[in-house]
Image (cartoon, rainbow, N blue to C red):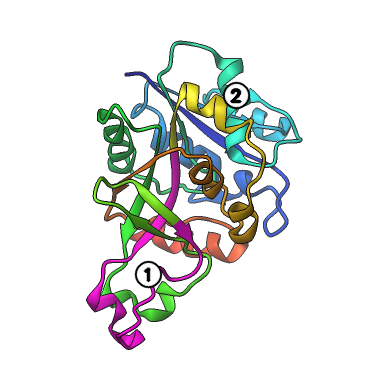
């Protein structure tokens, strides 16, 4: 199978404008993401709507494709980029442009999900541990995932699922394995085309989680397990934390 990596990167951001071009350890954030991906997949491109990002990617020798400014999600941007790039790719991998520490092992785990011919969409999950503590588990910015026996997602939620009726909250992480969703997606090419034409769903609107639209429409999402903690950059404060993390890597 052939895998195409696409890294959506917008210049405009409410919490952190120009985030892809922010410097992290002497390189832009988008360059660090690109370098983590290039070589692991069969090909990789940054998909952007801004000429400043386009120029920056070309400057470090990366591949880039310009896309519309009107996309509401990274998935939509990925599909436009895929149609412009062309080629006989079987799977398109959507790598967030603010994840400079994504690991090759995580990409390999997502790729392995497609060894199952029934996999339509794949993503990653990471187990919460008792050491994380209940406050980390209840963080609404860390969506939780419930999986079935075949490692397919049953549901994603910002709430804690399942709720343990007969146990104190201090024991929840000891009694059950909860999974944190890691926002890396891969789609079979024909599935990516289909899901970008779906209207927003009621569950998606309620939780503000795009993947619920796919579940509501009957698509299967296979989950691979990773033990690697990712550090996403949503704010300037996150960038400061990333600088500290980079020093100990």
Residue pictured at 39% horizontal, 75% vertical: 163
- Frontmost residue, 171 versus 217: 217
The reply, left or right, for residue 217 in relation to residue 249 is right
For label 2, the crowd category at 10 Å Cα-Cα, with few meaning under 14, some 14 to 19 and many 20 or more, is many
What element does badge 2 sit on? helix
Q: Quadrant of the C terminus?
A: bottom left
Q: Position of residue 105 (x, y in %)?
A: 27, 41
Disc marking residue 162 = 1
The reply, left or right, for residue 87 in relation to residue 83 is left
Q: Position of residue 214 (x, y in %)?
A: 52, 41
The boundaries of the magenta stretch are 156-185
Residue pictured at 67% horizontal, 39% vertical: 199
- Frontmost residue, 95 versus 30: 95
Residue pictured at 56% horizontal, 16% vertical: 85
- Frontmost residue, 235 versus 151: 151
**Mark 2 — residue?**
81
């Amino acid at each position: 199978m052939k895998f195409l990596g696409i890294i959506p990167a917008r210049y405009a951001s409410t919490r952190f404008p120009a985030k892809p071009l922010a410097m992290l350890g002497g390189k832009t954030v988008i360059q660090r993401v690109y370098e983590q991906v290039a070589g692991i997949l069969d090909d990789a491109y940054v998909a952007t709507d801004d000429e400043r990002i386009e120029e920056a990617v070309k400057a470090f020798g990366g591949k880039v494709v310009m896309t519309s400014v009107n996309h509401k999600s990274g998935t939509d941007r990925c599909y436009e980029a895929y149609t412009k790039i062309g080629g006989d790719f079987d799977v398109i991998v959507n790598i967030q442009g603010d994840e400079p520490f994504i690991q090759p092992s995580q990409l390999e785990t997502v790729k392995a999900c497609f060894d199952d011919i029934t996999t339509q969409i794949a993503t990653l999950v990471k187990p919460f541990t008792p050491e994380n503590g209940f406050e980390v588990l209840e963080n609404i910015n860390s969506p939780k995932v419930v999986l079935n026996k075949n490692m397919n997602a049953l549901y994603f939620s910002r709430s804690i699922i399942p709720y343990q009726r007969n146990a104190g909250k201090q024991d929840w992480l000891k009694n059950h394995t909860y999974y944190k969703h890691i926002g890396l997606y891969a789609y079979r090419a024909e599935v990516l085309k289909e899901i970008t034409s779906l209207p927003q769903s009621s569950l998606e609107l309620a939780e503000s989680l795009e993947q619920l639209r796919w579940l509501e429409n009957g698509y299967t999402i296979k989950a691979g397990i990773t033990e690697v903690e990712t550090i996403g950059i949503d704010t300037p404060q996150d960038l400061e934390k990333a600088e500290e993390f980079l020093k100990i890597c």
